[in-house]
Amino acid sequence: MINFKNKNILITGASGGIGNELVKKFVLLGGNVLGSGTKIEKLDLLKKKYPNIKVKKFDIAEHSRIEEFIDNVSLELGGLDILINNAGITKDGLFVRMKEDDWDSVLAVNLKGSFLCGQQAAKHMMKQRQGAIVNIASIVGIMGNAGQANYSASKSGLIGLTKTMARGLAPRNITVNAIAPGFIDTEMTRVLDEKIRDKLIEQIPLSRLGLPDDIAHSVAFLVSDRSSYITGQVLNVNGGMLM
């Protein structure tokens, strides 16, 4: 069984559906976990549910504070072995009508925020000469999606960033991979009209939306010792929607 005893793990975007499941997974597998996010009430609920974890309210869009944030996380945890770049936002709109501010804000969190968190986390991992980073990308970063020019571009960029980070950090025994989830059953997809959800499911060979646990299982594998020879890869977790 995969075990993360004595591993210090930072999960960004921990207050969301996938983030919640990631925290649960790594707690159950023995990790020393700190979850960050922007919704303090949801972080407090996580802390009540899993008293041994640490939580920290932080907005990844505050780029100038990311170095300090990562340093403080490492101090609180007693080191930093694993980073899961899960923080992300959406601001959907038709391509021809998309506001520049909506483009900038999504790229600022999903791509630049992940870049800066990865950069600062890598500095700590390089001193240890070991570490693992997983970036949460998306199926739409590969296939595109109408109404999500900003989100699709940010996730596509994250895939390119993942491969470049992997090449640069491999000599220090740091692996960097990405997970590209398909459509996952979270608050974000539950607000969709039932007809739209049904139409989505029709396009998925496994005939269901993914579960947050499907993503958490995959992330746990990619940051475990069992995948120490895997780096620079994108694992598609989408029920066969994209092959």
Image: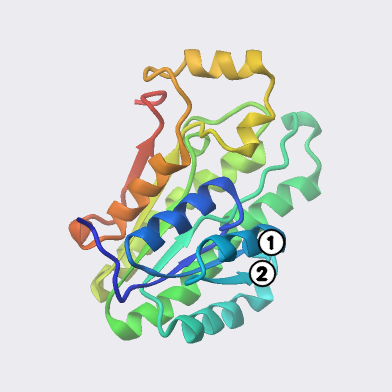
Residue 212 position, x and y percent, is 47, 42
* Residue found at x 45% / y 55%: 24
Q: Residues within 10 Å of mark 2 (few under 14, many from 20)?
A: some
In this rendering, would 165 be left or right of 141? Answer: left
* Residue found at x 59% / y 19%: 197
Element assignment for label 1 = loop
Q: Are marks 2 and 1 in contact (CB under 8 Å)?
A: yes
Residue 101 position, x and y percent, is 80, 50
Q: Is residue 92 above or below residue 121?
A: above
| Tag of residue 85 | none
Task: Pick the quarter of the image with the N terminus.
Answer: bottom left
The tag earlier along the polypeptide, 2 or 1, is 1
Marks 2/1: CA distance? 5 Å
| Tag of residue 38 | 1
The residue where tag 2 is placed is 57
Q: Residues within 10 Å of mark 1 (few under 14, many from 20)?
A: some
- Amino acid identity at mark 1: Thr
Instruction: Report the front residue among 104 and 82.
Output: 82
Numbered circles on residues, count: 2
Instruction: Report the front residue among 9 and 227.
Output: 9
* Residue found at x 72% / y 46%: 103
- Amino acid identity at mark 2: Lys
